[in-house]
Amino acid sequence: MRYTLPLGLLVFTTACLKEIEVDVPTDTGELVVEAYYNSRDSAFVRVSRTTKYFGASRPPLVSNAWVVLEDLQAGTRDTLRWRDTAYFRITRNVQPTAGHTYKLVVRTEDEEAQATCVMPQTVPLDTVFVIYRPAVGRLPEGYRGIGIAQDPPGAQNAYRARIWRNDTLFNRIFDWFYSDDRFIDGRLIVFEFPYALQPGDTFSLEIMSIPQDVIQYYEQVVRNAFGGSGGFSPPPDNAYSNFTSRRRRVWGYFIAYATDSKGARVPR
């Protein structure tokens, strides 16, 4: 009589364990820049530095940098000044224009980083409303907030949706909703808030029209945060960045984006 062992058992009985030392980079002090400029003429830049991989301290903020925002087509520029925890504009020479390329320069005592980004066209939200829905999969029964927009055909758009409930932004990394338009080109875009709303709650939705290469940055950040897609995934790698520097790597991203938002209230 012939016996056949399951493949999983064969692998288990023949496998061996080997300790592997992981060389974790120890370089610290690299610049980290989080920067946004949008179609509502709002600019925000936060600058910090990296710390040790296993360190318990929070990344130190950089409060003495020289930060400048430029419109390369119009030839205008604004200087941003430190206030509390980030940099904000003190002049309003730069104006938001779809299709214009914006440049951000961050200069410290010993290095300079710069990035450019093109502002996309605004894709408006057609409507935002609240509807009562039964339980579907992991989504519980209850009121849902829904937003609808029309993707322009052939424009190669990309989007991120930001959602508020009662003035609280859902901004944890697993609440990031983003996508390009490869599967929805020229069709309706439907955003559904994945948490139940209660009677009297307010629901607000912002649709950010972002350059497609920002999706690559988001994807890398999310993969690193959640440790890849399984046991055979590659180790976390440097997140994609549009910043360049002659001295060292620069982390983070400068995003120019167009925005539209609407809100609704759950009936009592």
Image (spheres, grey):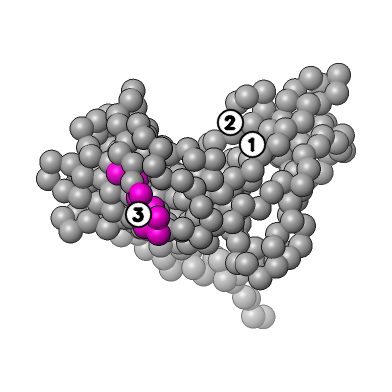
Instruction: Give coordinates of residue 33: x percent, y percent.
Output: 33, 44
* Residue 141 shows in this picture: no
Q: Which residues are magenta?
A: 68-76
Disc 1, SS: strand
Q: Nearer the viewer, residue 5 or 175?
A: 175
Q: Which residue is mark 2?
A: 169
Q: Position of residue 25 (x, y in %)?
A: 22, 51
Residue wearing tag 1: 163
Label 2: element kind? strand
Name above or below for residue 132 compared with residue 161.
above
Identify the residue at image location x=35%, y=31%: 90
For label 3, the residue is: 75
Residue 107 vertical placement versus 75 (above, below) = above
Amino acid on which the number 1 mark rests in the picture = Ile
Q: Nearer the viewer, residue 54 or 103?
A: 103
Q: Nearer the viewer, mark 2 or mark 3?
A: 3
> If the image is split into quadrants, where does the N terminus sit?
bottom right
Toward the viewer: 34 or 5? 34
Q: On the rendered structure, is 203 left or right of 69?
A: right
Dots 1, 2 in contact, CB < 8 A: yes
Which sits earlier in the primary sequence, circle 1 or circle 2? 1
Disc with the residue nearer the chain's start (2 vs 3): 3
